[in-house]
């Protein structure tokens, strides 16, 4: 069986198998961000909620430092031994990190070592999810037919956002079952344990995946930096537009909840409901915008994102900061996510199609991971630092500057790609 002889049903089965694991990996990774305010006090000695959150989100940001290593390790493996095997290894590692967080000792038992143990668990998760992004983007882009690749690859972000949605939904359910005191004491651990179990279960689905790497085996230097160096221009372009895209993604999908609690003044449960509804709309937007990208051109859609992002970021965040009604906040967050869909629906395919098959997973994942680590994973930490110094609006300007860089890089994307 070859890629060209796969039936539509076989392709759909492979997409579902790959996407199920992708959803679980991102759930495991994001449940930390959405529950950090529950357990921050368990690992930080500060009584100031903002300072405690800064410490906890610093660990969140440090977890991103493992992403380039994970993308190199698993991306190289994917190009050498196959996408399927590499995906299986990455999800096993994610399960290990989630189970570890579920049983971590707190500062009351081991003192300052608690934050170190938390960091180790996050580094394991960062290593895993660093590999997952590049392989998933590569795999889904290779499965798609010409003219529908944007639609097919958009399902990477359907499941990525679905992982966030599942994380928020889990937090909502937990708040309905447990009191705030119970959540802060022990109940937050349940979410990480569930994530570990789901990661192991997704291995069953990934056994049915078709491997798309047959054509890369004829290349001696497949999956190496030596081969990747031949495509350094593509690498730099991915670095450029990912910087602004990742920063916006984590600002509007991850930090928004903390922003609404700390700045707008909404209760935790209210912000959970807002994010749950907004992320649901965001998931629906992905295949729609992926199909639009197939029609008008993915480069054009990415340029629309950059232009709207530069124009709308400051008013969106400023208005959200002063929102009086949860309904208004929902509309504002949803608007930001609709604009963001112009990036996320086509981000995976744009990256993957810049590299040939023998370094596609490595190039896609490694370039993404570097920008994501520097700008995406640090978004909540940088935003909270600006806030702690009374300069919260300066963070809005920072986001706009990175969007200008994204827009600049987009101009240089080639018309003909390695998938054509």
Image (tube, grey):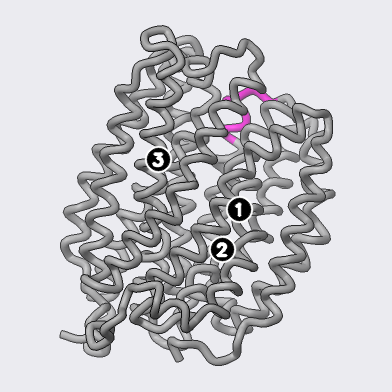
Q: Can residue 31 be spotted in the picture?
A: yes
- Marks 2 and 1: CB-CB under 8 Å? yes
Q: Which residues are magenta?
A: 266-273
Image quadrant in which the N terminus is located: bottom left
Q: Residue furthest front?
A: 226
The residue carrying mark 2 is 344
Q: Residue at x 32, y 67 (%)?
A: 76
Above or below, 152 against 134 in this view is below
Question: Which residue is more in the foreground, 60 or 202?
Answer: 60
Residue 268 belongs to magenta span: yes
- Marks 3 and 1: CB-CB under 8 Å? no
Secondary-structure class at tag 1: helix
The residue carrying mark 3 is 123
Image disc number at residue 94: none
Q: Main secondary structure of the magenta part?
A: helix
Question: Which residue is more in the foreground, 115 or 170?
Answer: 115
Distance from disc 3 to disc 1, alpha carbons, whole Å, reads 21 Å
Q: List x then y, in percent, for residue 114.
A: 41, 19
């Amino acid at each position: 069986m070859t890629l060209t002889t796969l039936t539509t049903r076989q392709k759909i089965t492979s997409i579902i198998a790959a996407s199920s694991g992708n959803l679980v990996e991102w759930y495991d990774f994001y449940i930390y961000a959405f529950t950090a305010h529950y357990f921050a006090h368990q690992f930080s000695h500060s009584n100031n909620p903002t300072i405690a959150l800064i410490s906890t989100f610093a660990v969140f940001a440090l977890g991103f430092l493992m992403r380039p290593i994970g993308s190199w390790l698993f991306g190289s493996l994917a190009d050498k031994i196959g996408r399927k095997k590499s995906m299986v290894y990455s999800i096993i590692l994610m399960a290990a990190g989630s189970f570890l967080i579920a049983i971590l000792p707190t500062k009351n038992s081991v003192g300052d070592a608690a934050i170190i143990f938390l960091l180790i668990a996050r580094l394991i998760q960062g290593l895993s999810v660093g590999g997952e992004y590049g392989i998933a983007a590569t795999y889904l882009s290779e499965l798609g037919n010409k003219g529908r690749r944007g639609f097919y690859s958009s399902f990477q972000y359907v499941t990525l956002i679905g992982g966030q949605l599942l994380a928020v939904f889990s937090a909502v359910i937990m708040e309905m079952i447990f009191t705030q005191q119970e959540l802060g004491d022990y109940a937050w651990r349940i979410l990480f344990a569930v994530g570990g179990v789901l990661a192991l279960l997704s291995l069953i689905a990934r056994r049915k995946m078709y491997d798309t790497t047959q054509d890369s085996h004829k290349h001696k230097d497949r999956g190496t930096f030596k081969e990747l160096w031949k495509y350094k221009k593509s690498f730099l372009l991915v670095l450029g537009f990912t910087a602004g895209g990742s920063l916006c993604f984590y600002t509007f999908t991850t930090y928004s909840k903390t922003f609404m609690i700390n700045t707008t003044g909404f209760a935790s449960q209210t912000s959970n409901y807002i994010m749950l509804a907004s992320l649901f709309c965001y998931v629906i937007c992905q295949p729609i915008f992926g199909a639009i990208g197939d029609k008008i051109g993915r480069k054009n859609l990415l340029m629309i994102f950059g232009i709207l992002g530069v124009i709308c970021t400051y008013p969106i965040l400023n208005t959200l900061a002063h929102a009086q009604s949860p309904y208004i906040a929902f509309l504002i967050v949803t608007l930001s996510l609709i604009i963001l869909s112009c990036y996320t629906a086509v981000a995976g395919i744009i990256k993957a199609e810049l590299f040939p098959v023998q370094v596609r997973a490595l190039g896609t994942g490694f370039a993404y991971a570097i920008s994501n680590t520097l700008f995406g994973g640090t978004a909540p930490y940088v935003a909270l630092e600006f806030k702690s110094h009374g300069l919260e609006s300066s963070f809005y300007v920072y986001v706009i500057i990175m969007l200008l860089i994204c827009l600049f890089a987009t101009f240089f994307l080639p018309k003909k790609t390695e998938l054509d």
